[in-house]
Image (spheres, rainbow, N blue to C red):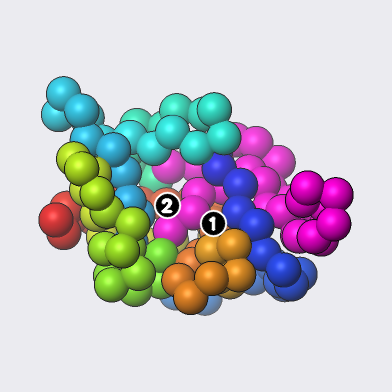
Amino acid sequence: MSCQASRTKMKQMIAKEDIICYKVVDNNFGKMFSFDEHCYTEFKFDKCHICDERFYQKIETCHGYNEYVMYYGGYLSYRDFNSALQHKYGDKKVLKCIIPMGSKYYEGYLQSSYWPTYYSKELIVKEICV
C-alpha cells in the first residue's frame, strides 16, 4: 500500500474499461516489488494485486501549514511512460500495468507536480518496459 498527496480533492471513479498505466518498482534478486508507506508488495505478472486495506481520502496538514488531501489503501502508478521514466533510477524497473475494468481509482498528480498519476485499488502487471 502507498499513499498519495494532492492539493485538491479528487472524485473516486470506477474504471469503465482497462486503463493502461506504468508502475515503478524495485528489482532485487529477480523479484519486483514496491515498498511504500512501510508496506511491501511483490508484483507478479497477470496477477490482480488487490490492496486489502480500506481505500479512502483524508485532508491532512503537512508541516503545520499546507493542507493536502491524502489517499490511502491503493497503488500509485503513472498515467504515461515518460512520467514513470522520470522516477526510474538505479536498478528500478518500469512495468506496464492495467487498472482492470470495474476497479476503484483516483486520477491526479504526484504531490501536485507535473507527473500525472493514478491511485487505484487494483493493478495487474502486463510487461517490463525497462
The residue under the point 39% across, 45% down is: 48
Neighbor class of circle 2 (other Cα within 10 Å; few <14, some 14-19, many 20+) is: many
Q: Amino acid at mark 2?
A: Leu
Task: Find residue 119 and report its image quarter.
Answer: bottom right
Q: Which mark is residue 120?
A: 1
Residue 118 seen = yes
Residue 126: percent from left, percent from top: 23, 55
The residue lying toward the viewer, choosing from 67 and 12, is 67
The residue lying toward the viewer, choosing from 48 and 1, is 1
Check disc 2 and report the residue beneath it: 123
Magenta-colored span: 49-77
Q: Amino acid at mark 1?
A: Ser
In the shown orientation, is residue 113 left or right of residue 93? right
| Disc 1 element | strand
Residue contact at pointers 1 and 2, CB within 8 angstroms: yes
| Disc 2 element | strand
